[in-house]
Image: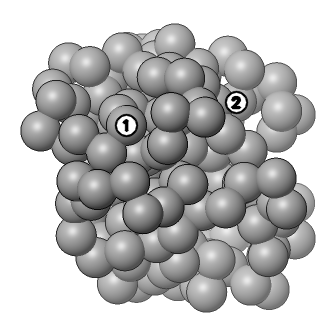
Amino acid sequence: MIYVIVAIKNEAQAFVDKFKLNTSKSNDKISLIISGIGSENMFNTTKNIIEKMNSNDTLVNVGICGASKKYEIGQLLDASSASLRKDINLTCVDYEVSHNNYEVVDMESKGFIEASKDVKNKYIFKIVSDHFEPSSVTKNMAKKLIFDKIDEIMEKIS
């Protein structure tokens, strides 16, 4: 089973549409879970999922992020290693960032990393949604950004 955790409904809707998931947001291959925004929500949700997982299951956090102009809007970032990739400086904060003091910023990765530290098959994928202009991101935009990268994400985890 692939457990996909997202923070918000719009991110989840991309997976629901792509995989034609039922009202329980699952099928025989994927189980989709919405954690809510923030590191603490992601930590608690991830811990609950891990209790249900088998050793051959895969855990995936997918979401949008803000980033410097070094990254293009819509660019998929793979931040999957436990200490994060050396080429991606992902910072987790508890608020929307409207200034360019970071390279890449999100609100959930820290909780996912902490909760899943003992999980072998885990991935973090972030899609750049803005250049530190969070008010420019619409619900439909968030959904489309995720939807457009699902095939690439699924290739990377298989």
| Residue at figure coordinates x 47%, y 44% from the top left | 67
Which amino acid lies under the numbered mark 1 shown in the image of this protein? His
Count of numbered labels shown in the rendering? 2
| Residue at figure coordinates x 29%, y 56% from the top left | 99
Q: Quadrant of the C terminus?
A: top right
Does 23 appear above or below 149? below
Q: In the rendering, at what x and y percent does residue 38 appear? A: 30, 72
Element under disc 2: helix
| Residue at figure coordinates x 82%, y 60% from the top left | 85
Nearest-to-viewer mark from 1 and 2: 1
Circle 2 crowding by C-alpha within 10 Å: few under 14, some 14–19, many from 20? many
Image check: 61 left or right of 29?
Answer: left
Image check: 39 left or right of 125?
Answer: left
Q: In the rendering, at what x and y percent does residue 24 appear? A: 32, 42
Label 1 vs 2, first from the N-terminus: 1
Which residue lies under the disc numbered 2?
153
Element under disc 1: loop
Q: In the rendering, at what x and y percent does residue 20 appear? A: 42, 16
Does 99 appear above or below 114? above
Distance of label 1 from label 2 (alpha carbons): 22 Å
Does 104 appear above or below 73? below
> In the rendered image, is residue 138 in sight?
yes
**In the drawing, what numbered circle is on residue 131?**
1
Figure quadrant of residue 107: bottom left
Q: In the rendering, at what x and y percent does residue 126 appear? A: 55, 43
Image check: 17 left or right of 109?
Answer: left
Q: Are marks 1 and 2 in contact (CB under 8 Å)?
A: no
| Residue at figure coordinates x 22%, y 53% from the top left | 98
- Which residue is at the front of the view, 22 or 2? 2
> In the rendered image, is residue 49 in sight?
no
